Amino acid sequence: MRRVEVGGAAPYAVEVGPGLLTRLAVPETPSALIHPADLPAAWVEQAQASLQPHLTVTVPARDECKTLEVFADVLSQLAQAGLPRSGAVVGLGGGAATDLAGFVAASYLRGVAFYTAPTTLLGMVDAAVGGKTGVNLPEGKNLVGAFWPPRAVWCDTATLTTLPDAVFREGAAEAFKHGLMADPSLLDRVVSPDFRPGGALLEDTLADAIAVKAGVVTRDLTEQGERAFLNFGHTLAHALEAVTHQAIPHGEAVAYGMHYAARLSHALGGADLTAHTRAFLRWQRPRRLPPLTFDALAPFIARDKKADSAGVRFVLLRDLAQPYLARVPDDVLRREFDGWQADLAELFPL
Ligand code: GLY
């Protein structure tokens, strides 16, 4: 069992290890458990048995739950059940369900205690830590939400055993990203055969990847500065997700995006880190992208949250663990896009 501390104004601990769902406990009472419909019944039953929630709310699977309609429906269910301000909301499931549950906790009665038990690798390494909660709008992802940090995070590694292999590999992209931006010791470990559910390297690698994010959000919860570095690879990733109407899952889009960002970093004078991002793509085996042109992606790249009136800023790396933000000239973006496509054709021949 590993424990990672998150500091700041409201510190909390992230526990990492097997069997945590069998001993969930919160001081607030009563509690409401929120989980997605596709979560294996065993994990819901374990959480219910240990937490003894006053009510359990089932929400649609994946991003289907991250809507204002589902948000309103869950709030109504809590109100009808009479959950008081002294109660707690516990989010169990992948990043979408825990993002929704956190926003419900942030909003219901102007805020109640929030706890989270992520059950996917992506949820554990990224979504559960740092207090970003919210839902999507038809106009874009995560456009409504609140910073509402949890009071504890329980990463029960046993839940990863029921994740499809491709979903585990997808989630590993964020752990690999934490390696590139802050802890290079993660790079070899994340692509090792022992980094798998039940594997010898799982718990320590996962805890060390979480520790990178814990450090960043301890220093910069509301993204005034270094939290933006967590978006390494995400500018192209968000554009790929948008242009494919989310057919490319987030972690796979991030793997593609990290390789592009590594190329841009090198083009602007940084170290050549593309061997790392190539190795990760080879290991992850993301689904193939449809034929894409830079011009089709450019409007989505321009919408990036790190854009300001002077243009889009990319998170780049001077070297391993040396991230910075930079505006990249349009001709470099285009040239490296062509190089990126050539690299992908070589990595994944037809
Ligand atoms: N997923 C990026 C962040 O939490 O800031």
Image: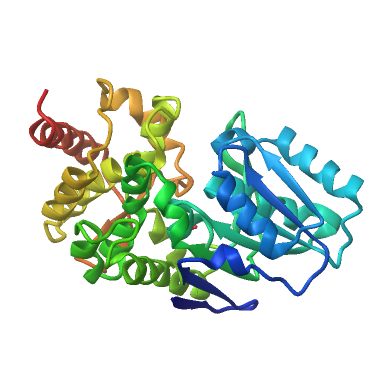
Name the residue located 68 percent from the left edge and 71 percent from the top edge: 25
Left or right of residue 172, residue 19 in this image? right
Front residue of 315 and 275? 275
Left or right of residue 178, residue 23 in this image? right
Left or right of residue 225, residue 285 in this image? left
Front residue of 51 and 42? 42
**How many numbered tags mark residues here?**
0
Does 20 sit above or below residue 284? below
What is the x, y in percent for residue 224?
Answer: 52, 65
**The N terminus - image quarter:** bottom left
> Colour mode?
rainbow
- Residue lying farthest top? 291
Front residue of 250 and 92? 92
Splitting the image into 4 quarters, where does residue 238 fall? top left
What is the x, y in percent for residue 211?
Answer: 41, 72
Name the residue located 32 percent from the left edge and 40 percent from the top edge: 166
Name the residue located 50 percent from the left edge and 63 percent from the top edge: 155
Does 77 sit above or below residue 177? above
Name the residue located 44 percent from the left edge and 61 percent from the top edge: 157
Q: Can you see residue 318?
A: no
**The C terminus - image quarter:** top left
What is the x, y in percent for residue 13?
Answer: 55, 76
Splitting the image into 4 quarters, where does residue 76 fall? top right
Q: Can you see residue 72?
A: yes
What is the x, y in percent for residue 109?
Answer: 86, 57
